[in-house]
Image (spheres, rainbow, N blue to C red):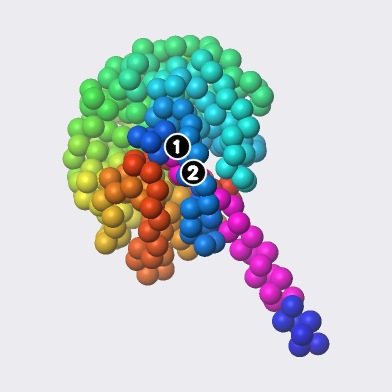
């Protein structure tokens, strides 16, 4: 009986951590490569060459395919998210720097950073159909969609602005000035406020986007850049790329809760394990990827990768929804 109970416990434990078998996919934008890391052992298991300047990646709405954007090669690579292997390449996608799907999966948007353009596609679950190429200066960077699928917000990194685009009409609704070098975006619960990471400053701006008003600046650290929600309904993380810290923000009180310090230079993109225990992060300026234990807030592993690690993904991650 004891042996059976022990076996059952081990089976449950093994099943609960089956996600650890999914490889971590890391994009090296400067080295034009993808590195695969075994999530359990935290060791590099493969590195292979891809198109020029792969910066960001995005899973398709069904989660079955990972899209990798090779911005200078002007193509999208389709990657099996469970193996990290390329299955096909789609040419003719101009300068896909940042990618995004609307919540309902109908719209696919690609920001052309060097072309000063936002391309809007319709997506039927299989193919992408271009519907509008929208000039939008200067250097459209990150994006986020409203929950009702009506608007995509885009940061304009070099004109220090935020733009709102109507998806049905594919027209610019408005633009507004914000802080220096706006980058990552996040919407607080019920899409009440828009959070913008100010890479040229040391704060996150809180914007009442309904009234186009900056209502607060949350001081985080130099180079506030990109977001990752904890999916607990209350908190979101922001990487401070110059400060080399990660701040946790309370989305309800709009205050900083804490900082995670002791990191390598240039924390950028982040991803969470399903149990919220470990945060994986690319260190853009130090040729490495790190793992932070969210219980102790300590960096517990560092894995050497390519010259400029940027995008990061693994299949069975914690959901992004608030």
Question: Residue 223 at x, y = what percent?
Answer: 23, 43
Return the residue found at the far bottom: 2
Instruction: Identify the residue position indicated by label 2 in the image.
Output: 47
Regarding residue 31, the answer to whether it shows in the image is: yes
The quadrant of the image that shows the N terminus is: bottom right
Count residues near mark 1 (Cα–Cα under 10 Å), then give few for <14, some for 14-19, many for 20+.
many
- 1 or 2: tag closer to the N-terminus: 1
Instruction: Identify the residue position indicated by label 1 in the image.
Output: 33
Residue at point 18%, 40% (across, down): 201
Is residue 98 shown above or below 266? above
Residue at point 24%, 38% (across, down): 199
Q: Is residue 190 left or right of residue 137?
A: right
> Is 39 inside the magenta-drawn segment?
no
Contact? badges 1 and 2 (CB < 8 Å): yes
Count residues near mark 2 (Cα–Cα under 10 Å), then give few for <14, some for 14-19, many for 20+.
some
Question: Residue 84 at x, y = what percent?
Answer: 57, 42
Q: How many marks?
A: 2
Question: Residue 204 at x, y = what percent?
Answer: 26, 43
Q: Is residue 34 left or right of residue 30?
A: right
Residues rendered magenta in the picture = 8-27
Residue at point 25%, 38% (across, down): 198
> Is 21 inside the magenta-drawn segment?
yes
Secondary element at image label 2: strand
Magenta span: helix, strand or loop, mainly?
helix
Is residue 23 shown above or below 167? below
């Amino acid at each position: 009986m004891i042996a059976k109970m022990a076996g059952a416990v081990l089976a449950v434990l093994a099943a609960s951590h089956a996600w650890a078998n999914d490889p971590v996919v890391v994009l090296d934008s400067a080295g034009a490569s993808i590195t695969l890391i075994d999530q359990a052992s935290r060791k590099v298991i493969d590195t292979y060459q891809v198109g020029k300047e792969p910066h960001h990646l995005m899973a398709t709405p069904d989660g079955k395919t990972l899209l990798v954007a090779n911005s200078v090669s002007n193509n999208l690579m389709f990657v099996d998210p469970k193996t990290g292997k390329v299955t096909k390449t789609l040419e003719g996608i101009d300068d896909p720097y940042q990618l995004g799907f609307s919540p309902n999966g109908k719209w696919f948007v690609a920001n052309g950073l060097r072309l000063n353009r936002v391309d809007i596609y319709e997506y039927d679950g299989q193919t992408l159909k271009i519907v509008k190429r929208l000039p939008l200066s200067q250097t459209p960077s990150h994006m986020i969609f409203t929950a009702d699928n009506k608007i995509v917000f885009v940061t304009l990194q070099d004109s220090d602005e935020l733009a709102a685009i109507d998806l049905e009409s594919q027209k610019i609704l408005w633009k507004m000035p914000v802080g220096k070098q706006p980058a990552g975006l996040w919407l607080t619960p019920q899409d009440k406020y828009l959070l913008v990471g100010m890479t040229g400053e040391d704060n996150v701006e809180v914007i009442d986007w309904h009234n186009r008003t900056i209502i607060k600046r949350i001081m985080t650290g130099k180079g506030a850049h990109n977001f990752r929600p904890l999916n607990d309904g209350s908190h979101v993380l922001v990487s401070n790329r110059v400060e080399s810290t990660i701040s946790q923000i309370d989305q309800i009180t709009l205050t900083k809760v804490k900082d995670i310090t002791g990191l390598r230079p240039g924390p950028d993109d982040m991803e969470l394990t399903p149990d919220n225990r470990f945060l994986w992060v690319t260190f853009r300026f130090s040729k490495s990827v790190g793992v932070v234990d969210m219980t102790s807030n300590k960096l517990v592993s560092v894995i050497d990768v390519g010259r400029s690690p940027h995008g990061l993904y693994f299949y069975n991650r914690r959901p992004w929804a608030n």
